[in-house]
Amino acid sequence: MRTLYHHPIHPQSRVARVMLAEKGLPFEPVVEKPWERRTDFLKMNPAGEVPVLVEEDGTVVAGGLAVIEYLEEAYPDTPLLPREVAARAEVRRIADWFLHKFEREVGENLVGEKLIKRLSGQGHPFAPAIRAGLANITYHLDYIAFLSERRPWLAGTTFTLADIAAAAQLSCLDYIDNVPWDRSPEAKDWYARIKSRPSFRALLADNITGCPPPRHYADLDF
């Protein structure tokens, strides 16, 4: 069986999970706690980071970007990137925005401080970082609203990797109830469509022991 080593509240792991589901590829999810630095896991990925995909033939694909690109190239029958070169560049631009810029400005400051530090025993949350994250998220919601008003999906007319990347980040924040949905009805409507996709159901079922999500987290109607 194809195996994905991941952490439930890790955006790039969530991207991999959704991509696998969208492409109809069965897999066994194995929760990995990167901060434990297990020897067997480090043998697969010396960087000690999730996600890591292990194919049925033993092929190991390690790291978020590598897994994302591998899945799109190895299983092109259900494409998550458009055919046109310029359109592909736009998808990559938006995906990069959320996987890196959003993660740096929001995810690390909120999910990292409030949840990951707690799970990994890395100390107390840093209040200035949390304040920065709460301030920054409004800017990103406004950007989602801006795109949603002009396109059916974030990067164009079809559901793509750009939507998966943005939804993966927001779902992590929504797990800790830190998305001010009322501020942006456009972003909320877009996310509701993502939540309704079958590929997203496993993410909405996540429940970390001792850190349950808010009630609306798995509610398709919020």
Image (cartoon, rainbow, N blue to C red):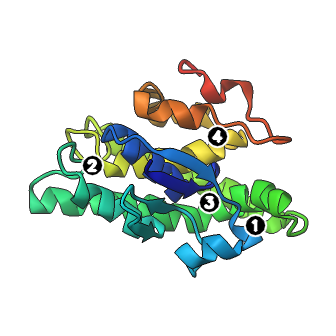
Q: What's the distance in space between the residues labelled 4 and 2, CA to CA?
A: 22 Å
Residue at (26%, 40%) from the top-left corner? Answer: 150
SS at circle 3: helix
Circle nearer the N terminus (3, 1): 3
Q: Which mark is residue 106?
A: 3
Numbered circle sitting on residue 129: 1
**Residue for point 47% across, 34% down:** 200
Q: Amino acid at mark 4?
A: Asp
Query: Looking at this rendering, what residue extends furthest in the top direction?
Result: 221
Residue 72 tag number: none
What residue is drawn where x is 33% and y is 51%?
161
User: In 3D space, how far apart are the residues under numbered discs 1 and 4 (Cα atoms)?
Assistant: 18 Å
Q: Residue 20: x and y, percent? A: 38, 45
Local packing at callout 3 (Cα closer than 10 Å; few below 14, some 14-19, many 20+) is: many
Which numbered disc flags the more N-terminal residue, 1 or 4?
A: 1
Q: Between marks 3 and 4, how big is the CA–CA gap? A: 12 Å
Query: In this view, which residue lies farthest toward the bottom?
Result: 46
For residue 199, what is the image quadrant? top left
Where's residue 107, x and y in %?
A: 62, 59
**Crowding at mark 1 (Cα within 10 Å: few <14, some 14-19, many 20+):** some
The residue lying at 32 percent from left, 37 percent from top is: 24
Q: Residues within 10 Å of mark 4 (few under 14, many from 20)?
A: many
Label 3 vs label 1: CA separation?
A: 9 Å
Q: Position of residue 207 (x, y in %)?
A: 72, 36
Q: Are marks 3 and 4 in contact (CB under 8 Å)?
A: no
Q: Which residue is mark 2?
A: 155
Residue topped by disc 4: 174
Q: Which numbered disc, 4 or 2, marks the residue that appears first in the sequence?
A: 2
Q: What is the three-letter code of the residue carrying label 2?
A: Ala
